[in-house]
Amino acid sequence: MMTHTTLAQLRSLKLDGFAAALEEQLAQPAASALAFEERLALLIDRELLWRNDRKLARLLQRARLKYPQAAIEDLDTRAARGIDHRQITSLVLSDWIATGHTVLVGGPTGVGKTWLACALAQYACRRGHSVAYLRVPRLAEELRILHGSGGFGKWLLQMAKTDLIVLDDWAVAPLDVSTRNDLLELIDDRGSSRGILITAQLPVEHWHAWIGDPTIADAILDRLMHRIHRITLAGESLRKSAQKAGITLKAGDAA
């Protein structure tokens, strides 16, 4: 009876990992041979693991990544793709997000830019960072809805507090005046303690013309290019290669 009461109290305190580990210990006679301090350490360790798993699940759910299962450990680093494994490793282990750096994943269509961006963002979630995934071609419509409903200010504040923003398919569609201004606000709020991850086909030297307004373009590019890491993917479109070989790609392989 006392055990049931203890388990109920642990769960009422939201110590579910601790409670589950305690139930396992009670079901394993060998656990009684451990010292009290050893058993307690195992219980606390399980609680920490449980909390970390729950936090990661929440971060991934809020990130809404296009490919949430993309993992940096699964990255195809064959030489033909132009990926420097040392560059990727150095980047993911650095504090580029907390120091407000920009990462640009460039290259032609179909070479895996979106997948790599999602893998980097997923790793950021694993390190405890909050992430928001935004597709730039859809952003204009989403922003119009936010402005119309009066929710733009709240959304902008939420984005300003997010550790990493992913801007996927940058410069694919033309920018209208309102979206251009909103993009400046979004990027300007990043400061020196929030990261930006961009995927783009259009070379950087053409971004100024794509943005349109010279003053806003200067402001956006100054903030993005101040501290930037460039990853350029190469090779033939993975979709075309798979089609020629009669292979069906898994979701994300050619993003």
Image (cartoon, helix red, strand yellow):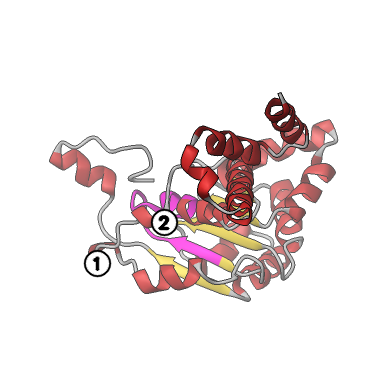
> How busy is the neighbourhood of tag 2: few (under 14 within 10 Å), some, or many (20 plus)?
some
Locate residue 83: give its quadrant.
bottom left
C-alpha separation, residue under disc 1 versus residue under disc 2: 17 Å
Mark 1 lies on a secondary structure that is helix
Asked whether residue 198 is in view, the answer is: yes
Q: Where is residue 13 in the image (x, y as percent from the top left)?
A: 77, 37
Q: Residue furthest top?
A: 1
User: Disc 2 on helix, strand or loop?
Assistant: helix
Q: Residue at x 49, y 70 (%)?
A: 91
Position in image of residue 4 (x %, y %): 69, 26
- The answer to whether marks 1 and 2 mark residues whose Cβ atoms lie closer than 8 Å is no
Q: Give the range drawn in magenta.
A: 103-118
- The location of residue 34, given as percent across then percent down, is 54, 51
Residue drawn at (69%, 63%), measured in percent from left and top?
A: 194
Residue where numbered disc 1 is placed: 79
Q: Can residue 61 be seen in this view?
A: no
Determine whether, in the image, residue 255 is placed left or right of residue 8: left
Q: Please tell me the numbered disc located at residue 72.
A: 2
Q: Residue 224 in the image: x percent, y percent?
A: 62, 68
Q: Is residue 229 above or below residue 30?
A: below
Is residue 214 within the magenta segment?
A: no
In front: mark 1 or mark 2? 2
Instruction: Out of 32 and 161, give the one closest to the viewer.
Output: 32
